[in-house]
Amino acid sequence: MSSDIFKRAGLFIAFALAQALVLGRIHLFGCATPLFYVYFVLLFPRNYPKWGVLLWSFALGLIVDIFYNTPGMAAASMTLIGAIQPYCFEMYISRDAAESLQPSMDNIGWVKYFYYSLVLVIVYCLVFFTLDVFTFYNWLEWIKCVVGSSAITLLMILTFETVRGRQE
Amino acid sequence: MQNLLEFLQKYHHWFLFVLLEVISLVLLFQYNSYQGSVWLSSANAVSGKVNEGRAEVESFFSLRQMNEGLTLRNFYMERQLSQLRRLYSEATEDTAGLWAKEMSFLKQYRMIPAKVVTNELNRQDNLLTIDRGTKDGVEVGMGVACGQGVVGVTYLVSDHYAVVMPVLNTASRISCAIRGHNYFGVLRWNGKDAGVAYLEDIPRHARFKRGDWVETNGYSSIFPPGVLVGKIETVYNSDDGLSYRVKVRLSTDFGHLRDVVVVNDPSIVERTRLLQSARDSLKLNVKE
């Protein structure tokens, strides 16, 4: 358990720094921002304590918020997908799967992994950008942001996952 | 009781979920009105340091270009200054004495040089962070400008960092005037193009033309008068038809912001106090 905490903490810092230093500054076509830290939530294995998923996601969201002066936005969205991640993963695996199965392309297959990440990324982007434009009714901009950021985030996650699968 | 405990045991993660969501939403909705949340912003020490390091690295790649720009501008200013000085002495037939007296008003503004450590352009409410805070004399509500023109107003200040609300923030209001005509209005941004802002409430009887310069008017005492804002591009009628709405091409390039100055005017406290007491006495009179 303690080695797991150290591993997650390492990942946590890596994701936070990557987002704060590089990824958060990319705005393709003025709307598509890679929100790669969502991948952190996707990595929790089956039967990981649900409160643990929630706390980790909330904390990472809060750190991202602090760096980008958006208090609560990323934290609220990350907590939400942290809550649905265990159920979402459960949908794509069989009942008799290994107790602490790691969500990855190799373990559940390309197509299932794609849908699994698609659902979580879309939910995240929807909530995140809805909170962002809360006071500002510019629907076209909102849709552009949701679609653009979801696409680029998903692309990054799938690329990363493919590379990781090959290395192992 | 047993059942209740079991219930709590079984669904405790949902309670945690609700708790965390409530915390997030409180943060979200309090941020704009709650000035004490410095440590949750990019002005806190840790994120400030990280961002400072990144800005340092980035600056290596843009210093040369920036230097060229500044040298050119400096040269232009020097030429303009000498021209003005000549014209002034011709017009007043006076020596350096009067000129020095005229220029002494600049001294009441203390400039605090600062570096931008984070910057954003793509949101409705952009904010940027600079590496000077209360320890360096920066306080909330001070004007920030750069070599090219106006930048914004400090919004949150911690010991060593400050968050600035730039012109490119839908909540930003800066009092400006049209150079040479002294008609004034309020500069606002509509959340779209990062190179354009709108000067509103220009009176209908004002006479000006496209290409005129817009600058700060010094009424708000956040900025000294005459800080460049931009050039008039198009003129529209306001929605209610009672005033003009002027589209201004901003002279500051917010995409390449690096070195800025915080303008500290010691007379600001006195002026705001006076204005406040005037308002209070007006209110009292109305009540009577």
Image: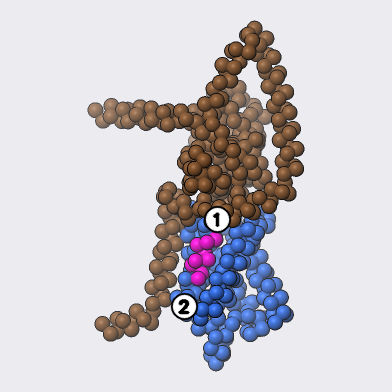
Chain colours: A blue, B brown
Tell me which segment is drawn in magenta.
A56-64
Mark 1: amino acid:
Ser
In this orientation, which residue lies closer to the viewer: B129 or A33?
B129
Res A98 visible: yes
Residue B201 in picture, x, y percent from top left: 51, 32
Q: Which residue is mark 1?
A: B47
The chain holding disc 1 is B
Q: Does residue A150 appear in this view? A: no
Is B17 in front, or is B74?
B74
The chain holding disc 2 is: A
**Could you classify mark 1 by the number of other residues whose Cα lies within 10 Å: few (under 14), some (14-19), or many (20 or more)?**
many
Q: x, y percentage for residue B143?
A: 53, 36
Q: Residue at x 59, y 13 (%)?
A: B98
Q: Is residue B246 above or below residue A123?
A: above
Which residue has dot 2 on it? A50
Question: Quarter of the image containing the C terminus of chain A?
Answer: bottom right
Q: Residue at x 32, y 30 (%)?
A: B280
Q: Residue furthest left?
A: B288
A28 magenta-colored:
no
SS type, badge 1 = helix
Instruction: Say whether residue A63 is magenta.
Output: yes
Q: Circle 2 sits in a helix, a strand or a loop, which is it?
A: helix
Residue at 48% across, 64% down? A76
Q: Nearer the viewer, mark 1 or mark 2?
A: 1
Q: Position of residue B152 (x, y in %)?
A: 55, 40
